[in-house]
Amino acid sequence: MNSLLRKIWQSFLVSGRTSSYLKYAIREIILVVIGILFALQVNSWNQNRLEHIEEKKILTNLHSEFLENEKIITQILSKLTEARKSNREIIKLMGATADELKIKNLDSLFFESFPATQFTSSNQSVNNIIQGGRLNIINNEEIIKQLYNWQSQVEAVIIRESAIDDWTYDKMLPVLSKYISFKDMDTYGRFEWTGKSKLKKDYYPLFQSLEYENLLDNFLYLHLQQYEELEKAERIANQIIDLTKPYLQ
């Protein structure tokens, strides 16, 4: 292009048509600039189109992932509700007579009081987005905010869950093991090693123990905290589900 313009310039100089050359050169420059701007615009449009496609894919995956998380939380909350119900019934029996205890299925109550729950959330999409530096793809600021809220809330749930596990294994079970049969209790879980224990057990002293009542009282408090943290996680999950629904493919 420069070589051509030089030749044209020399030609115009020879013929004395400098002003015509300037008009021609300016016109060519304008055309070149327009061409560059058009190419940049096309490239920007194509980039935005690709990012929009990626954003839609990301949000669709998030929607599916949080539908699964909401399902997981609902199942755990259901089990915790049953556990709290059993523990409340047990604590009401504290100080009961031997005759009052005999008419209760205590092994079943104890089994239900320790729910086999573990909050294992589905976080693959969230981790891929945050760790991969793809948050900038999402244009909805509220979705980004709720993703950060979700990560914080998952940590809070895990902390509460860990506190219950520690209290169960370090405090509750050592006391219970002196009075009840775990083998009899586990019959209600249909484990292969369970069955009627041949060893002597006596529930009555347990229900006269102030130590056990205090342990049980705090156990109920820890369950309440865990339940509340899970409810917060459920609300965040539902918000993300609602926010990502319009982007479904």
Image (spheres, rainbow, N blue to C red):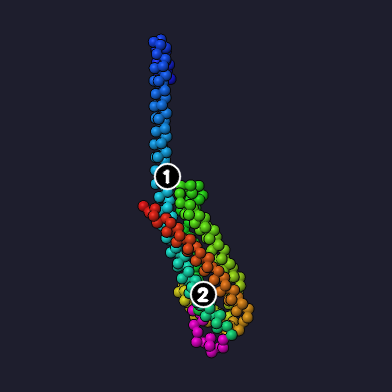
Note whether 220 is above or below 237 in the view shown.
below
**Residue at the (46%, 51%) spot, across then down:** 140
Q: Is residue 13 left or right of residue 87?
A: left
Q: Quadrant of residue 16?
A: top left
Disc 1 secondary structure class: helix
In-front residue for pair 104/29: 29
Asked if the residue at tag 2 contacts the one at tag 1, i.e. Cβ–Cβ closer than 8 Å, the answer is: no
Q: Amino acid at mark 2?
A: Arg
User: x%, y% of residue 5?
Assistant: 41, 18
**Residue at the (39%, 46%) spot, across then down:** 53
Query: Magenta span covers which residues?
Result: 96-108
Residue under circle 1? 51
Note whether 140 is above or below 35 in the view shown.
below
Q: Quadrant of residue 211?
A: bottom right
Residue under circle 2? 84
How many residues crowd mark 1 within 10 Å: few (<14), some (14–19), many (20+)? Answer: some
